[in-house]
Image (cartoon, rainbow, N blue to C red):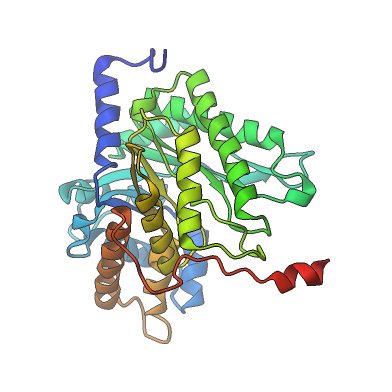
Amino acid sequence: MTGTFLSASQKEALEATAAALATRGKGITACDESAGTIGKRFEAVGIDNTEENRRQYRQMLFTAPGSEDYLCGAILDPETLYQKSDDGTMFPQLLKNRGIVPGVKPHLKVYILPGTGGDTVMQGLDSLAVRCKEYYNAGARFAKWRSPIEIDVSAGRPTDLAIKANMSDLARYALICQSEGLMPIVEPDVVLTGTHTLEEAVAVNTKVLAELFKSMIDHRVYMPGATLKSNIINPGKDCPISYSVEDIGKANVSVLESTFPVAMKTANYLSGGQSLEDAAARLSAVNKANKHGPWNLSFSWSAAFQLPLLELCKGTDGLQFDAMSKLYVDELKIASAASKGEWDGAPGDGDHKGDRRKRKLEE
């Protein structure tokens, strides 16, 4: 039996957070980039990477007029969790006031798992309980832990060891979060790089998710009080075979139907290097293909939203808050429609356009 370490009131609180993040037509904005990651994005468009610029930029994402109509959650970096708005309101409280549940990214950095040929695991479990308690007291009500996994079929990756180690870590993280009052989002991220086919991606993702949910149950994680953030299952970015957006939608649903527990209320897909147009078209296709699953299938995007916003700052004298805010809400409208299967986009959006000449050249 799962969740035996939790009281009835603790289970109720975790389920309430999970239900809030499963609100139909709404999704999660991922604003949890480290100072180094957001700094690279800033520097690419000529913005100084200062703490104040990061604060003002996140403030714009949290206060854009109308954004609350499309957002149910926001993932914050620990730095942002402790920052305030211009009027002195702590960001977690500001989000709560707008009906948006604040969350936090508690993991640290990746390191290479020896003997696997390049597979990685994430650091940060040792001090997690203490940090979760601090994050809860600061106003966070959920957390998100990412475990990146790469497919390299020719090299035999991901290895079974890497899959088991990462999924066990996600389960242990989820257990610790629940014990400290934070609803855990588990994020196995099978990244887009590679030449693997859609069929190979389906096989790997099925194995990864099956291992994840088994490990969570083995750890006695309370499944109704946890949610999933997953990559959209795609062929590798350099796969030479073409697939339609409908192919991709059906492939994702087939994996969910084979693995995803009905006790979990929502899967919020990451953008993972996809453009807004492709991510939206594929999310919409997944929802259209989902005929039987009871889950909410929505978004938890960072780069797909933010890179177009930052492009507005290129060649200007700083962060263009008004223009960025308006574009951001327009992006959220698209994401919301996609989360309901109501976004079509332009012809070709979401298709994977392979180039068989690449395979011939490699051969």
Q: In the drawing, does residue 310 fall left or right of residue 339?
A: right
Q: In the drawing, does residue 175 fall left or right of residue 266?
A: right
The one of 152 and 52 positioned closer to us in this rendering: 152
The one of 107 and 83 positioned closer to us in this rendering: 107
Q: Which residue shows up at 64% across the image and 64% down it?
A: 241
Q: Which residue shows up at 38% across the image and 80% down it?
A: 313
Q: Quadrant of residue 246?
A: bottom left
Q: For the view shown, which residue lies furthest in the right direction?
A: 363
Q: Which residue shows up at 52% across the image and 33% down it?
A: 170
Q: Position of residue 247 (x, y in %)?
A: 50, 56
Q: Position of residue 60 (x, y in %)?
A: 27, 65
Q: Position of residue 264 (x, y in %)?
A: 36, 32
The one of 84 and 120 positioned closer to us in this rendering: 120
Position of the N terminus, as image quadrant, is top left
Q: In the picture shown, does residue 124 fall above or below 83?
A: above
Position of the C terminus, as image quadrant, is bottom right
Query: Does the rendering let one see residue 163?
Result: yes
Q: Which residue shows up at 72% across the image and 51% down it?
A: 152
Q: In the drawing, does residue 282 fall left or right of residue 152?
A: left
